[in-house]
Amino acid sequence: MEVHELPGRSPLIVAEVPAFAAAEASCPADDTVLLYGHCDKQPEMTGWRDHLGPWLPVQEGDRLYGRGGADDGYAAFASLLAIEAAQLAGTPHSRLIILIEASEESGSPDLPAYLEALAGRIGSPTLVLCLDSGCLDHERLWVTTSLRGLVGGDLRVDILTEGVHSGEASGVVPSSFRIARLLLDRLENSTTGELQLPELHEEIPADRRQQAADTAAEFPIGGHFPFVHGAQPMVHDPAQQLLARTWRPSLSITGVDGIPPIDIAGNVLRPHTTLHLSVRLPPTCDGEVALAAIERCLTTDPPYGATVQFLRGHSGPGWNAPTFAPWLQAALDDASIIAFGKPARAFGEGGSIPFMGMLGEMFPEAQFVITGALGPGANAHGPNEFLHVPTARRLTECLAHLLHAHATR
């Protein structure tokens, strides 16, 4: 095990485990499985319950609370425990490489440099196991078949060089916040939430539509979110809800600068407003094309001649899984039945794991298993995040079986 740190980059943990019981395996000696996770977290947020906290591990029943426990603090430990379990059982596995990165929550900007620097060490994996996704229930192994891409950046609008008295200037000087609203209307239909740039849309494959329909019949996703009393989702059909969170682009405003808290706000027309935009993209959308289109949309011909900038713009690729090989589909079902008592199920995920897109391009012939213990109510990226411990244990058991199946396929 080593901790690599390229100049100016966040660190990367690399562990290598040689093939085990190779005489019983049917794969080549240099065949490689890559296991991936990340150790960085989102900011700690507010709203944790009184006896909980982002940096305080607390177990209540089956739930282990703490920041990043389910996204993605367990990944390194589950990988190592799965390998140990396979070896203790005497079952063979191929050569293994474990990568735990530290910039995933920022879109993995440092990862390409490490993949290039460590290309010889990594080799050409024929199976990639990623522990950074979720599950729709705790009753079976869930495998993620697609991930959305991501474009992020800061929309900054400047209209004044300094704040001025709102009574004196309003009606003549436009609000920087209203200008930002006008610009966002170019990007998003504020009534429906539909994004309006064609560069952000992709045709949804027929098999993914069918998969959404099959999964929605048993697992309506809309009820998974903590709506306030009387609130309702943007779309009501369960299948369309799944497609909306996995194959359609969406905009979220996740941060604001330039607006003071209410208790210290004065009657001042503020000089600028900055909004952090998080745009989720369809799995097959070109992130760089989408980023350029968003920047062009927001900064061209600004209202009132305001100074408009799209700062720190970045993109991360989405990913659409290759079809499972017959041996892998059988292994997924077998592992799920052994560990959970039910066969595996597949679904698309709304989040982004840029690593998958990068690896998909580097190793187009590899098989991918994207899975995770992030289940209903676990609230990744929010307060009171928890890891469902029994699911994490069963998932670890499934990994051990998949390592065996790969080595003897």
Image (tube, rainbow, N blue to C red):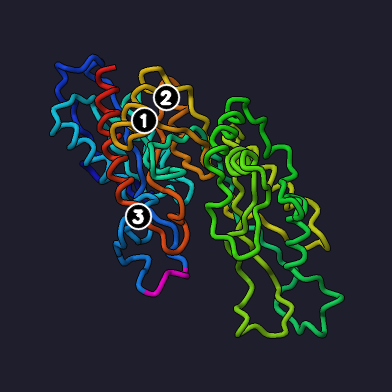
Q: Residues within 10 Å of mark 1 (few under 14, many from 20)?
A: many
The Cα atoms of the two marked residues, 3 and 1, are separated by 22 Å
Q: Specify whether residue 70 is in view.
A: yes
367 left or right, relative to 146: left
Q: Is mark 3 on a helix, strand or loop?
A: helix
The answer to whether residue 279 is above or below residue 117 is below
Of the two numbered discs 2 and 1 in the rendering, the one whose residue sits closer to the viewer = 1
Quadrant of the frame with the N terminus:
top left
Report crowding for label 3: few under 14, some 14 to 19, many 20 or more residues within 10 A (C-alpha): many
Q: What stretch of residues is rendered in magenta?
A: 46-50
Residue position marked by numbered label 2 in the rendering: 363
Q: Where is residue 183 in the image (x, y as percent from the top left)?
A: 75, 56
Q: Residue at x 65, y 40 (%)?
A: 240
Placement of 320 over or under 153, stated as above or below? above
Say which amino acid is labelled 2.
Phe
Please report contact status of discs 2 and 3: CB closer than 8 Å, yes or no. no
Q: Where is mark 1, residue-wise?
A: 128
Query: Label 3 is placed on what type of residue?
Result: Gly
Please tell me which of labels 2 and 3 falls first in the chain: 3
Which callout, 2 or 3, points to the residue nearer the camera?
A: 3
Is residue 207 or residue 259 the one in the foreground? Answer: 207
Q: Which amino acid does label 1 sit on?
A: Val
Is mark 2 in CB contact (under 8 Å) with mark 1? Answer: yes
